[in-house]
């Protein structure tokens, strides 16, 4: 049966569901490909948060043998969820592209009051490793199985820290940098509505592409 999915926020349909993984693998790694029937679709589905994605990542890692691709995907989704949820709750900002996630992850870290060492840890040991896990979904083999537990723990720290960032301050800096003025390669569009994230509905006022 047909399968819907998103490519950088644009809805496409794969005619044969059995071909979905092959179709997804043909996109470049810096393109955000979301399975709409997976974690970002209808109300009937199980609801997910970054925390439940991490639990799923650990579950797949604990299997015998470990399901590394599923574990990598769920850990990556946890990191993605943390960034997208931060901006949706800070200012109803819907980040659509993979490049946008990376750019605005860095922006949130830079706008925080965290120490240099903590910001560096979040950027390289957490988000950077999450991106490498995303590559592992496509069989890149960036990490040994024995390394997955530590990487998932790092992403858990990332999720916890992002949940505690000052949202009012972040939106103030976002507005100053990207709404009151413009920035190269950042496309902010006024677009009111609602967006689903992990089965939950969030208000949207802006759509952002990088």
Image (cartoon, helix red, strand yellow):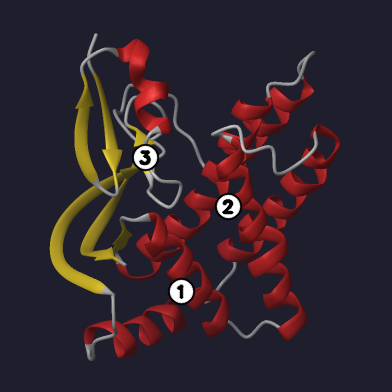
Closer to the chain start, of discs 2 and 1, is 2
Q: Is residue 9 above or below residue 123?
A: above
The residue where tag 1 is placed is: 167
Which of the two discs, 1 and 3, labels the residue nearer the N terminus? Answer: 3
Q: Which residue is mark 3?
A: 27
Q: At 43% across and 61% down in the image, what residue appears?
A: 101
Q: Secondary structure at mark 2?
A: helix
Q: Which residue is mark 2?
A: 131
Camera-nearest residue between 168 and 148: 148
**In the structure shown, which secondary structural element does the residue marked by tag 1 occupy?**
helix
Q: Residue at x 75, y 21 (%)?
A: 66
From mark 1 to mark 3, how far is it between C-alphas?
Answer: 33 Å
Q: Position of residue 159 (x, y in %)?
A: 62, 56
The answer to whether 123 appears left or right of 116 in the picture is left
> Is residue 45 something one can see in this rendering?
no
| Residue density around tag 2, few if under 14, some if 14–19, many if 20 or more, within 10 Å | many
Q: Secondary structure at mark 3?
A: loop
State if disc 3 and disc 1 touch (CB < 8 Å).
no
For residue 170, which quarter of the picture? bottom left
Looking at the image, how many numbered discs can be counted on the residues? 3
Relative to 201, 111 lies left or right: right
Residue drawn at x 32%, y 70% as measured from the top left? 91
Q: Splitting the image into 4 quarters, where does residue 197 fall?
A: top left
Q: Is residue 27 visible?
A: yes
Q: For marks 2 and 3, give the one nearer the viewer.
A: 3
């Amino acid at each position: 049966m047909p399968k819907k999915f998103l490519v950088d926020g644009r809805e496409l349909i794969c005619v044969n569901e059995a071909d979905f993984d092959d179709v997804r693998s043909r996109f470049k790694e810096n393109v955000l490909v979301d399975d709409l029937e997976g974690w970002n679709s209808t109300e009937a589905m199980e609801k997910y948060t970054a925390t439940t994605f991490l639990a799923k990542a650990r579950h797949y890692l604990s299997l015998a043998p470990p399901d590394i691709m599923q574990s990598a995907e769920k850990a990556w989704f946890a990191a993605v969820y943390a960034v997208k949820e931060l901006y949706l709750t800070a200012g109803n900002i819907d980040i659509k592209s993979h490049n946008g996630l990376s750019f605005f992850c860095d922006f949130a870290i830079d706008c925080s009051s965290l120490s240099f060492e903590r910001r560096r840890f979040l950027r390289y040991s957490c988000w950077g490793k999450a991106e490498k896990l995303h590559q592992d979904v496509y069989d890149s083999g960036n990490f040994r199985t024995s390394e997955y537990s530590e990487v998932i723990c790092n992403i858990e720290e990332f999720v916890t820290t992002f949940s505690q960032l000052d949202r009012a301050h972040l939106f103030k800096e976002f507005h100053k940098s990207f709404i009151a003025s413009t920035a190269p390669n950042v496309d902010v569009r006024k677009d009111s509505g609602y967006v689903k994230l992990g089965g939950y509905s969030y208000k949207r006022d802006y759509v952002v592409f990088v």
